Amino acid sequence: MTKATKVFLIIGMFIICGFIMSVIGAAAGNPNAGKPFGAVIAIGVLAASRAIWKYQPEKEETTKDIDKLDKS
């Protein structure tokens, strides 16, 4: 995963987090009502962004075991 992809994923995650926190505030009828949930969501977003940034998929091995067993 390239650095640009990671940056776009993190930005998208922050946008979704802001939307969720505003929905919680609007559902409660008070924009400040979502602050306790917002703190939990913000901690989760920070942990997820760190996980996205550190993600490095394992590279596939190009060498395969070609040895054949003797079946005689």
Image (tube, rainbow, N blue to C red):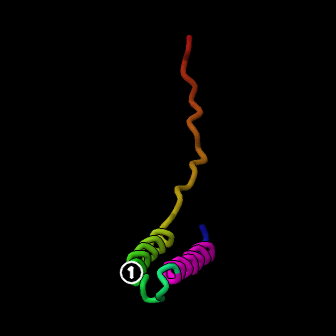
In the depicted view, which residue is nearer to us: 51 or 23?
A: 23
Q: Quadrant of the C terminus?
A: top right
Rendering coords of residue 67 (x, y %): 56, 30
Q: Quadrant of residue 65?
A: top right
Q: Residue furthest top?
A: 72
In-front residue for pair 47/6 = 47
In reply to whether residue 71 is colored magenta, the answer given is no
Label 1, residues with CA under 10 Å away: few <14, some 14-19, many ≥20: few
Residue 50 at x, y = what percent?
Answer: 45, 73
- Quadrant placement of the N terminus: bottom right
Pick the residue in front: 70 or 12: 12
Determine the main secondary structure of the stretch shown in magenta: helix
Range of residues picked out in magenta: 4-26
Image coordinates of residue 13 in percent, x first then y, are 55, 75
Residue at point 61%, 77% (across, down) = 8
Total numbered badges shown on the rendered structure: 1
Q: Is residue 23 magenta?
A: yes
Asked whether the viewer can see residue 7, the reply is no
Badge 1 marks a residue whose secondary structure is: helix
* Residue 45 in the image, given as x and y percentages of width and height: 46, 75
Q: Residue shown at 56%/80% (left/top)?
A: 19
**One can see residue 58 in this view:** yes
The amino acid pointed to by label 1 is Ala
Residue in view at x 56 percent, y 55 percent = 59
Q: Is residue 1 above or below residue 42?
A: above
Please say if 26 is above or below 1. below
Q: Residue at x 58, y 40 (%)?
A: 64
Q: Name the residue carrying label 1.
A: 39
